[in-house]
Image (spheres, grey):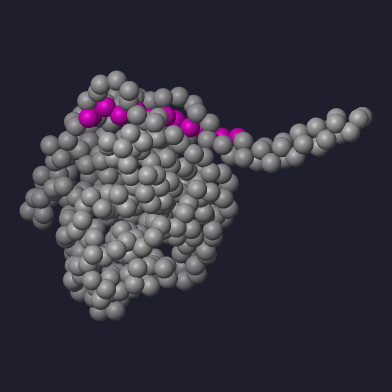
Amino acid sequence: MNTIAIKLFTLTAVLQMSLCPQDKERLRFSRDIAVTLSTSKYDPSSLGYIQRGNTGFLHYFNTADTTIDLLNLASGATEKIPLSKMDSLHPATMNFFYCYLNPDSIFCLFKKSKTICLIDESGEVKCAWRVKQELPGGISNYALAAYWTMPMKYHSGKLYLMAIRTDIVINNLPDIRKYFETPQSLTLDISGEEAGIVSLTGDWPGLYRSDRVYQDVHAQRCVNKNGEMLFAFAVDDQVYLYSGKQTQTANAKSSSFVMPPAFPLDSAYNFNYIDKYLIESCRYRSIIYDPYRDLYYRIAEKGIPYESPDGMTVRQQDDKPFSILVLDKDLNLLREQPFDPAEYLVHYIIPIPEGLLVSKRIRKKHEKNELLFSLFDLSE
């Protein structure tokens, strides 16, 4: 074998060794899935997936009818869960949060409230809890909430929510210090007649407690099949797994991530500057748990110039390239796969039994209730 052939053979072997592990974990395109929701007036942050038997449904909060709607992905039919029977406790409005566990157990939470309801699919209120305790540290001025970066979850008699302090305005250093000294993820024990606070977890990393702000006020959290919580933050490469009293830390850095500069406090109400800052900054958007494969997905957005190349227009959030980092149950980084914003949208990334749904741009003129997804297969 001549020298050139040996070099080519060696190069080929090296390439195969480096590429095969990545290809093994690659998100492989399967097919596109188009769906039509029952209304264009829905809360986008509420869109999720549930499985009943062998049938999959997309669920969302219909703000026009004040119902939780379930779209059967097989038949296209929509079922509605009425919420009017909770009106005596609190009317459901925008920023109404819920956790669909099964047809008999749907947990509901109202904006700026400390009341949690359990209803069934007929809308009947089966139980209600009023959280009366102070947060650890004697904090009484707070509200329960959920957010798309920290959704409401249930596991083994415990409900995972957010606790948001209501005595703070984040536009001055004293309040900023208080805010980032308080974790946001609240775990409640609802196994009895009264809800009891179990823990307040998810400490903000040190860079958030150094008198700097990054236009990030919501921590990111998902809950795995063991009831353990994995936390992530918008400008921190690390992820943090809370398991009982132990915390495991792992590096989950995107290859394109560049630490953004701190946000100037004197621009707190300059909304044009805020848009510019968020578009030009690299951000970690969310952390998602896949219960069907015991994986985690970390979504990373790449910063781009605010002005378009033509110098006449500015770019939007949807113009930012993004990638999905795939982590295994031990927080090993298996793969990072980029997505072109000209084709894909970061809005919805949803695990389902068949794979991973990623929202996609619709090229033709369409209604707001029409959505398009690409299904990616993760099987080996």
Q: Position of residue 108 (x, y in %)?
A: 22, 51
- Whether residue 102 is in magenta: the answer is no
State the extent of the magenta-drawn residues as a range: 368-380
Quadrant into which the C terminus falls: top right
Give the total number of marks visible in the rendering: 0
Q: Residue furthest right?
A: 1
Q: Closest to the observer: 90 or 242?
A: 242
Residue drawn at (38%, 41%) of the image: 320
Residue drawn at (24%, 60%) of the image: 267
111 to 68, vertically: above or below: below
* Residue 117 visible from this viewpoint: no
- Whether residue 372 is in magenta: the answer is yes
Determine whether, in the image, residue 377 is placed left or right of residue 35: right
Residue drawn at (47%, 54%) of the image: 258
- The image quadrant that residue 375 belongs to is top left
Quadrant into which the N terminus falls: top right
Q: Residue furthest left?
A: 88
- The image quadrant that residue 365 belongs to is top left
Q: Position of residue 336 (x, y in %)?
A: 53, 44
Q: Position of residue 131 (x, y in %)?
A: 21, 67
65 to 147, vertically: above or below: above
Q: Closest to the observer: 227 or 311?
A: 311
